[in-house]
Amino acid sequence: MGMMRKTDSGFRTGRIARDGAVLLSMIVAGACAKANDAGSMADSNAAGASTAAQSAPAGAADAQMQAVLDKLGGLNGKPIEGLTPAEARTQPTPTDAVKALLAAQGKPAAPPPGVTLTTRTIPGAGGAMPTNVYTPDGAGPFPVIVYYHGGGWVIGTKDVYDGGARGLALAANAVVISSDYRLAPEHKFPAAHDDALAAYRWALANAASIKGDPKRVALAGESAGGNLAVATAIAARDQKLQAPLAIISVYPIAGRDTTTASYVEHAAAKPLNRPMMAWFFDKYQRTPADVADWRVNLVGADLKGLPPTTIINAQIDPLRTEGEMLAERMRAAGVSVEQKTYDGVTHEFFGMAAVVDKAKDAQAMAGTALKKAFGQ
């Protein structure tokens, strides 16, 4: 199992101090000697790679994560914050890096068995939304997870985030609904949030048509999608809809403060950094007041009455602090929360189970929480 930090009593300000300059040199410059060692370790057997991951220096990407970062760097993507949204959507993604790493390791890129993918469209708040439906093998009816992909509400698609959605279907033995919601700046705030709520409403009304159980529905998402999962649960509470049984929020955008400890420590991290987050906020907002809205600034929202929530964070991620803070705020509001920060991995690691052991651990953690909520 991968190493991970568990915060059972809320956000702890007394985290281990890290040398920011050394950290940035490791992540941004690549720490060439270590990157070469990491790449060779990642090509070895899983046990060897796991051992190397466990012995990684504090604050550094572990061997498996570094191998993905090396492949991503080799794809020669341009800094997102210097591009137009249209250009940004054509850049290589961490998913592309995982595929390249699998090819280099001589491993198949085919998805694991046990889940069937079908496509359809469902109604969104502003029109039809292309949707992936992941159905476990078996007769059903299965619990249902409405999953929201990441990408800062500006980039990203349901297909780019296939690894996370498919992993949850397997880990929780549940049908997963993953839709392409409207993106900014063509559709600014609150378009993505409105579409997210529409997807949840559709799931409640139509679960039976996809071998799902409409009484057992949960919300999940990564990054901007992790934000959408929590915001949708709040909206469901306020609009007196059927409450989701659980929330899985993976490295969510949960605040608007870009001066937190993790934003400072990982200002130039890959694949997400502080300039990118500023670019995302700028593209999604109509005015600066939008990022102060509770739907974006979750740490300032009324969080009372939400279902059991699992928050998963990555150590090498500008969003780490606000994810841990969201857990603290939820606990203070009386919500049952489990939060873990995985050391040695970066933003976007959750869907990388094919090459990163800690992604397997994180998906298993989410699956365990979901099964408990579903009564399985």
Image (spheres, rainbow, N blue to C red):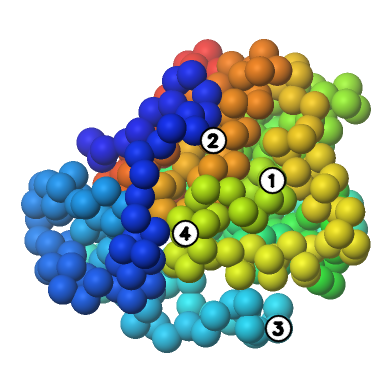
Dot in front, 3 or 1: 1
Res 84 label: 3
User: Taking the image as drawn, is residue 163 in sight?
Assistant: no
Q: Which numbered disc, 2 or 1, marks the residue that appears first in the sequence? A: 1
Name the image quarter holding residue 79.
Answer: bottom right
Residue displayed at 21% across by 76% down = 32
Q: Nearer the viewer, residue 149 or 25?
A: 25
Residue 38 image offset from top left, x and y in percent: 18, 65
State the separation of the CA atoms marked 3 and 2: 31 Å
Badge 2 is on which residue? 324
253 sits left or right of 206 in the view: left
Q: Which numbered disc, 4 or 2, marks the residue that appears first in the sequence? A: 4
251 sits left or right of 19 in the view: right
Mark 1 Cα shell of 10 Å, populated few (<14), some (14-19), many (≥20): many
State the separation of the CA atoms marked 4 and 2: 15 Å
41 up-or-down from 251: above or below: below
Badge 4 is on which residue? 266
For badge 3, the amino acid type reads Thr
Residue displayed at 15% across by 47% down = 55
State the separation of the CA atoms marked 4 and 3: 24 Å
